[in-house]
Amino acid sequence: MSLYSVASLETNSGANTLIGIGANGDNPHFGAYPNATFMMYTSLYGSADNPAMAMSKSYLMSGHWQHATAGTGRLELNGFTARTGGNQSSAAGNFVVGNDFINSINQPWRGLVPEVIVYTSPKSGNENQRISSYLGIKYGLTLRTGGVDSGTFDYLSSTGANIWNGAANSAYHNNILGIGRDDAGALYQKQSKSINENQKLIIGAGSSLFNMNSANTNSLTNGQFLVTGDNGLKQSLSVSLLYPGAAGGEINYRFASVWKVRNTGNTGTVIVAWPKGIVNLNLVRSTNETFDTSDDFIPMTGEVTVNGTVYNTAVVTFNDGDYFTLAGYAQSPGGVVADLGLWVKADDGFAPSLWSDKSGNDYHLTQSTAGLQPVLANSADKFNFNPAVNFDNKVMGNNQVANRGVNNSLSLYSVASLETNSGANTLIGVGAAGDNPHLGAYPNATFMMYTSLYGSASNPAMTMSKSYLMSGHWQHAVAGTARIEFNGFAARTGGESKFRSRKFCCWK
């Protein structure tokens, strides 16, 4: 048999059966066990080679075997052959989706399943690649053959035509998305977005977008595909590109991320969308990987709402092999754009449940628990006619800005006042629990950064209800690079700060 499914696991039940076969629907079965690792019971499970699955992430999972023939078992996750070997049997009986048994709940798959495909013979080679390509394009999956996060993949149509050559486009084999029509392959994807984390770009056929692909009224001709992937770099304004005379308004930066387009069958006009919020947003189209003012700048002045998010849009035609990026007018503290990770301001984008990030990264600070939500305070006298957020045993945070890699170096800046001394007063916390390192006032309301720059007579004392500019800086795990500044004064230097990525939060 060959089993294919696209699914996400939303809750880990310990043993999670996606598809079960046999007398009770439990032998063999296919899913995630133990510890949410992708497996096929009875022959290919319980090994360090079984890949781990992230909660709430969509995967293409497939399992293949020749009945009772040793060595023919095979497990694939997002196109990667994770394990082979074993001797898998499939006795006659029930076929079950979402559970281990047919008549009672046991080892359930607590997640979402948009599609299941079964073949009564094991598929491999070109056939397996075409089936996987169909599912990859339809569900916005980046498939790879070298590993879960490495290698490339050739996406094929039902005729075997190569609609995205992974090897030839290896530098752009990230966050793959595509539209296309393949009548024999039962594919008609009219709009697409990569389902990878933090991906926002949408491309659709024609000049309009819809909440669901099935509602899209635009059309493609059989055999038309437009597939794109990016270079894996930062998808925000971070590379200087000066163009004061751009048609849509002045441009000063572009994305580091660059997309390459593969256009099969002369796919015509498409709509490109990015969430609204960038000033003077333009799509920049080029015939090569270098972008300058001689390229095509297309203002993204259209607007459309897709599933509650407002997007800026542009309508464009891409030739096969074109490159594109996005550009705009970056605004940042003091004009310093490089490596800006988070920027929240009480006077722009605050709500008790979400404090909007203005850095362009959308690393919003959130708090869903009503009793922990801060409120906006009228602080005109204290902050020069500007409001402030009142954190009084309240907290907001995220797990994104401090999750940019295994180890992180940061500069933290905040203007704040301490209204009540709690003894230990955390302004900003980073790390596994959001507490190491942290920046605040301790002990005796002295400004400090834990763990390296605190508890000294050199730490400046803070006056209650007085506003200060406080900042802390460090190069991860490099001795002597830690620094805290207080109203512009370098109060202490030296020491060593480090953390492993997890949470970022403020005042509690």
Image (cartoon, helix red, strand yellow):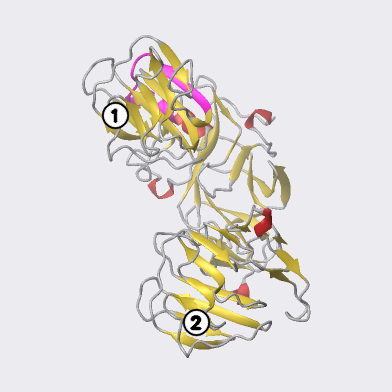
215, above or below 407, in the image: above
Name which residue lies at 51% across and 47% down: 197
Q: Residues within 10 Å of mark 1 (few under 14, many from 20)?
A: many
Within the magenta stretch, is there residue 115? yes
How many numbered marks does the figure carry?
2
Cβ atoms at labels 2 and 1 below 8 Å apart: no
Name which residue lies at 35% across and 78% down: 479
Residue 43 placement (x, y as % from top left): 27, 25
Residue 377 placement (x, y as % from top left): 75, 70
Residue 262 placement (x, y as % from top left): 49, 40
Residue 450 has which mark? none
Instruction: Quickly name the residue at label 1.
Output: 44
What's the residue type where badge 1 is placed? Leu
Q: CA distance from mark 2 to mark 1?
A: 53 Å
Q: Judge from the rendering whether residue 489 lies leftward or rightward of residue 352; answer left or right.
A: left
Residue 484 has which mark? 2
Q: Secondary structure at mark 2?
A: strand
The span shown in magenta is 114-132
